[in-house]
Image (cartoon, rainbow, N blue to C red):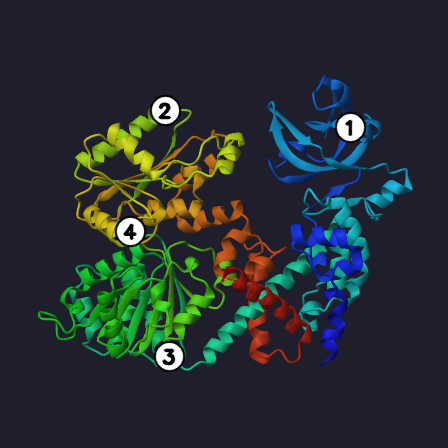
C-alpha cells in the first residue's frame, strides 16, 4: 500500500523546483498552479492552426486574449511630448488582420523599437493582450507577441516545437503569455507517465478510453483534431467519475446511519390539517408527498431534494411532512436564508394551521402544537421562551434562519430538517443542523430554482430528487415584456401608467432595483464605472427610484421601500403593511426574491433588469400572479437590442418554463457560478466537463460510481481512485477554510 504516495510524488513536485522561481511565482499567484500535477491539468482553452488566422470579430472584450494573425501594415507616429527627452514621443500603430476583420495594436515610448523592426507587413505571429475599444476601433495596447516564422528553428522552438500544426492556446494572464505556458508544459510533460490513474482498469478498457498519460500528452501536444477529442473524452470521464464517487460515498454513508422512522398517526395533526384545507392538493403534490412519507417511514435518514417551479406549492408539501413528523412524536425545523423569509414562512404557516398552531394555548385545538420563530434579531425574552419551547418539546415546529444552527439551540427530539432555498446553504451547515438530533434527522431540501437533471446529479448528487412542475389551480399566467428604456423612452412612461392602472383596479405592485442606494460610493469604483463604456452609470437604487416615483409618475400612491440593511422590525412592518394592502407600491431589492407571498400584487417592474441573472429574474417574476388576477412583469433595460444582455431578457420574456430558463442560464454563465456555491469542491474539479453538454457522461459516471462504491465502499482495491478522491476532498476542505 505504501507504494501509492511514492508513485505520485513526481506530480506533487512544486513548480518552483522544476521551472524556476519567477515563472513558478506567477503561476501560483495568477493561475493558482502550484505543482507539476496542477500544470498538467491546466488544459488549453482552444487550439489555433499554424496556417490559419483567428477570427477577430469574435474576440471577447476586456479579457486577456491570444490570437494568431497577420500584420497588414505598421506606422510610426512622432508627437510632441513633455515627458520624452527633446519633447518628442513615438507611437507605433500596427494593424493585424484575419483576412476579414482588423485589430489595431499600439506601442508607445521605448517599447516601439523592437516591434517596429519585427512586425513587418505579411509577418504572422501570436499576439496576447487585453482587447478593448478605443475611438470605436478594436485594439490591443502593448500586446506581447511571438513571431511564427516557420522557417527559423528559433521560432519553431518558441511555440514549443509542437509537432503538427495545432498550437494550444492556454488560459493566460498579462504576466505570463500562452506560449510561455506552452514552453513550461514541455518540461513537465515528462512527468505525465507518472500520473496515477483514478479510473478502474475495467472501466477504462471497457469504455475504450485513453490511458491518463496518453490523454495528458494528447491534450497538450495533439497531432490531429481526433487526438484532442480522444483526450477530452478521457479527461471529462475522470472529472465526472471522481466527483460521482465522492457523492456515491456520501449517499452510501448516509444510508448506513440509523434514523427514527416517523409515521403519521391516523386521525392526528396531519389529518386535522388536511380536513381544514380549502382546496385539494395537485396530483404532483400528492405524488411528491407520498415519496417523502415513504422516506420518513424508513430506518435511515431521508435525504431528498424537492425542486419546484415558482409557486408550485412546495411549502404546502413541506408543511405536511413537518406535521407528519410532529404526529409521530418528533419536532421539525425549517431553515430559511433570510429573516424576511423566515418571518414570512412563520406567518403563512400559522395562518394555514389556524387553531392547530396554538398548542397549549386557550382556544387551541386538542391535536395542536406550538409553532415558534427563531431569528438572530429577536429580543432576549422572546428568544429565551423560543429556546425553552424547543428543549421541552412544547414546540413541534420551529422556523428560523442560521440562528437555528447555533450551539445554544437544543431540541427535545428533532426528526426533520427542511432547508429552503438550498443554494444559499453549504453542505457544512446542513451537517451542523443534522447534529442537533439524538439520531440523524430526516432532511428535505427545497429549491425554487429549477435545476436541469445533470446539474442536480452533479451538485446535489447526494440527494434523491422530487420535482413539482404543476401549478395549483387558480394560479394566473404572467405576461412578461422587455421595456427598452433607452431606445423607446415612451415605453417606460407607459410602464408607470400600467402600474397606476393595476393600483386603480385594487391591486398592488413591486418595483425592483439592483442596489439600495445609501452606500458610500467608492471613488475608485466611481472612476472605473465612468470609464466603463457598457456601464456608464451605477445600477439604479431603491432609495433614489422610490423618491423619483413618488414625486413623478406614481405621485399620490402609497409607496414604501424594503431592503436588506433595514432593521428587521422595520422590514417586518413594511411587509405586513404591504401584505395587508395598505401600501400600493413596494420598491425593493431582491430581498423579495424568494417566498414572499402577496396574492394581491399583480405587477412588477424590474429596473436595470440586465443586471440580474436569468434564474433570478424568473424568481422575482414568480412574486406576481399568485392570486386569481393575471400577473404582469416588465423588464426595464437600457442595453442595446443586439447585446447579449437583451437576448437574455428576451429569453425570460419568451417562456415561463423555469427548467428551460435554467438551461439557458447555464449555457450563458460559467459553470463555476452555478456549481461553486452549492457544492464545495465541485467548482474547482470541473475543468473539462460541462454539465449541460456532457449529460450522457455524467449519467453513465453516476451509474459506474454507484456500482464501484457498492462493491468496495472504502475503495481498498482502487488506490489510484482513492488518491484522486483525496485530492478533490482536499480542495473541498481548503474551500471550507477559505469560506470560513
Residue indicated by mark 3: 298
| Quadrant (top left, top right, bottom left, bottom right) of the N terminus | bottom right
Q: Residue at image x 37%, y 68%?
A: 405
Q: Earlier in the sequence, mark 3 or mark 4?
A: 3
Residue indicated by mark 1: 112
Q: Earlier in the sequence, mark 4 or mark 1?
A: 1
Q: Measuring from the top left, give residue 720's x and y in whole percent.
A: 68, 72
Q: Secondary structure at mark 1?
A: helix
* Outermost residue toward the left in this view: 363
Q: Are marks 3 and 4 in contact (CB under 8 Å)?
A: no
> Which one is nearer the viewer's eye here, 376 or 122?
376
Q: Earlier in the sequence, mark 1 or mark 2?
A: 1
* Distance of label 4 from label 2 (alpha carbons): 36 Å
- The answer to whether 56 appears left or right of 398 in the picture is right
- Residue 630 visible from this viewpoint: no
* Distance of label 3 from label 4 (alpha carbons): 43 Å
Instruction: Answer few, some or many: residues within 10 Å of disc 1's Cα (few below 14, many 20 plus, some between 14 and 19).
Output: some
Residue indicated by mark 4: 567
> Which one is nearer the viewer's eye here, 18 or 150?
18
* Distance of label 4 from label 1 (alpha carbons): 59 Å
In this view, the mark in front (4 or 2)? 4
Amino acid at each position: 500500500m505504501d507504494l501509492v504516495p511514492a508513485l505520485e510524488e513526481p506530480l506533487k513536485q512544486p513548480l518552483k523546483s522544476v521551472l524556476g522561481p519567477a515563472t513558478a511565482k506567477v503561476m501560483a499567484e495568477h493561475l493558482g498552479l502550484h505543482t507539476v500535477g496542477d500544470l498538467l491539468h491546466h488544459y488549453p482553452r482552444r487550439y489555433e492552426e499554424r496556417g490559419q488566422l483567428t477570427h477577430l470579430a469574435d474576440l471577447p472584450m476586456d479579457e486577456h486574449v491570444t490570437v494568431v494573425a497577420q500584420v497588414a501594415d505598421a506606422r510610426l507616429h512622432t508627437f510632441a511630448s513633455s515627458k520624452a527627452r527633446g519633447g518628442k514621443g513615438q507611437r507605433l500603430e500596427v494593424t493585424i488582420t484575419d483576412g476579414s476583420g482588423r485589430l489595431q495594436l499600439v506601442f508607445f515610448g521605448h517599447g516601439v523599437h523592437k516591434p517596429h523592426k519585427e512586425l513587418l507587413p505579411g509577418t504572422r505571429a501570436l499576439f496576447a493582450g487585453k482587447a478593448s475599444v478605443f475611438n470605436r476601433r478594436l485594439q490591443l495596447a502593448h500586446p506581447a507577441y511571438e513571431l511564427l516564422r516557420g522557417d527559423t528553428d528559433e521560432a519553431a522552438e518558441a511555440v514549443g516545437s509542437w509537432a503538427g500544426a495545432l498550437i494550444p492556446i492556454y488560459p493566460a494572464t498579462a504576466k505570463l503569455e500562452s506560449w510561455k505556458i506552452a514552453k513550461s508544459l514541455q518540461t513537465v510533460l515528462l512527468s505525465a507517465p507518472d500520473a496515477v490513474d483514478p479510473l478502474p482498469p475495467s472501466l477504462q478498457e471497457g469504455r475504450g478510453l485513453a490511458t491518463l498519460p496518453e490523454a495528458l500528452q494528447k491534450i497538450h501536444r495533439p497531432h490531429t483534431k481526433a487526438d484532442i477529442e480522444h483526450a477530452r473524452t478521457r479527461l471529462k470521464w475522470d472529472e465526472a467519475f471522481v466527483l460521482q464517487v465522492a457523492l456515491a460515498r456520501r449517499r452510501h454513508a448516509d444510508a448506513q446511519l440509523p434514523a427514527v422512522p416517523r409515521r403519521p398517526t391516523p386521525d392526528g395533526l396531519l389529518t386535522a390539517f388536511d380536513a381544514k384545507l380549502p382546496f385539494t392538493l395537485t396530483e404532483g403534490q400528492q405524488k411528491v408527498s407520498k415519496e417523502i412519507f415513504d422516506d420518513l417511514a424508513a430506518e435511515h435518514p431521508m435525504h431528498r431534494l424537492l425542486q419546484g417551479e415558482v409557486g408550485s406549492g412546495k411549502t404546502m408539501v413541506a408543511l405536511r411532512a413537518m406535521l407528519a413528523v410532529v404526529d409521530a412524536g418528533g419536532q421539525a425545523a425549517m431553515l430559511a436564508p433570510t429573516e424576511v423569509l423566515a418571518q414570512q414562512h412563520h406567518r403563512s404557516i400559522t395562518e394555514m394551521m389556524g387553531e392547530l398552531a396554538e398548542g397549549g394555548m386557550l382556544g387551541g385545538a386538542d391535536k395542536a402544537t406550538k409553532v415558534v420563530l427563531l431569528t438572530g434579531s429577536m429580543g432576549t425574552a422572546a428568544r429565551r421562551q423560543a429556546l425553552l419551547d424547543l428543549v421541552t418539546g412544547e414546540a413541534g415546529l420551529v422556523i428560523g434562519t442560521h440562528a437555528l444552527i447555533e450551539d445554544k439551540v437544543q431540541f427535545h427530539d428533532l426528526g426533520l430538517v427542511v432547508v429552503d432555498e438550498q443554494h444559499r446553504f453549504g453542505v457544512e451547515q446542513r451537517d451542523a443542523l443534522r447534529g442537533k438530533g439524538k439520531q440523524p434527522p430526516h432532511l428535505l431540501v427545497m429549491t425554487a430554482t429549477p435545476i436541469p437533471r445533470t446539474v442536480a446529479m452533479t451538485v446535489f448528487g447526494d440527494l434523491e430528487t422530487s420535482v413539482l412542475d404543476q401549478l395549483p389551480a387558480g394560479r394566473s399566467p404572467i405576461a412578461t415584456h422587455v421595456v427598452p428604456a433607452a431606445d423607446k423612452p415612451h415605453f417606460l412612461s407607459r410602464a408607470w401608467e400600467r402600474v397606476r392602472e393595476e393600483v386603480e383596479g385594487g391591486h398592488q405592485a413591486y418595483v425592483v432595483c439592483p442596489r439600495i442606494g445609501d452606500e458610500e460610493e467608492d471613488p475608485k469604483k466611481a472612476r472605473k464605472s465612468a470609464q466603463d463604456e457598457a456601464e456608464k452609470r451605477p445600477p439604479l437604487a431603491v432609495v433614489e427610484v422610490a423618491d423619483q416615483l413618488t414625486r413623478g409618475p406614481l405621485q399620490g400612491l402609497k409607496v414604501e421601500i424594503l431592503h436588506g440593511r433595514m432593521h428587521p422590525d422595520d422590514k417586518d412592518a413594511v411587509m405586513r403593511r404591504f401584505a395587508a394592502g395598505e401600501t400600493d407600491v413596494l420598491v425593493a431589492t431582491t430581498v423579495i426574491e424568494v417566498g414572499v407571498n402577496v396574492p394581491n400584487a399583480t405587477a412588477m417592474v424590474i429596473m436595470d433588469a440586465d443586471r440580474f441573472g436569468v434564474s433570478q429574474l424568473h424568481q422575482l417574476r414568480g412574486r406576481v400572479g399568485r392570486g386569481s388576477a393575471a400577473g404582469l412583469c416588465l423588464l426595464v433595460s437600457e442595453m442595446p437590442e443586439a447585446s447579449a444582455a437583451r437576448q437574455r431578457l428576451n429569453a425570460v420574456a419568451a417562456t415561463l418554463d423555469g427548467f428551460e430558463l435554467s438551461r439557458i442560464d447555464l449555457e450563458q454563465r460559467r459553470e463555476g457560478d452555478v456549481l461553486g456555491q452549492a457544492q464545495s469542491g465541485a467548482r474547482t474539479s470541473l475543468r473539462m466537463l460541462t454539465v449541460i453538454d456532457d449529460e450522457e457522461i455524467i449519467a453513465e459516471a453516476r451509474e459506474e460510481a454507484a456500482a464501484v462504491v457498492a462493491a468496495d465502499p472504502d475503495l481498498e482495491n482502487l488506490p489510484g481512485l482513492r488518491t484522486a478522491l483525496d485530492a478533490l476532498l482536499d480542495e473541498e476542505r481548503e474551500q471550507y477554510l477559505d469560506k470560513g
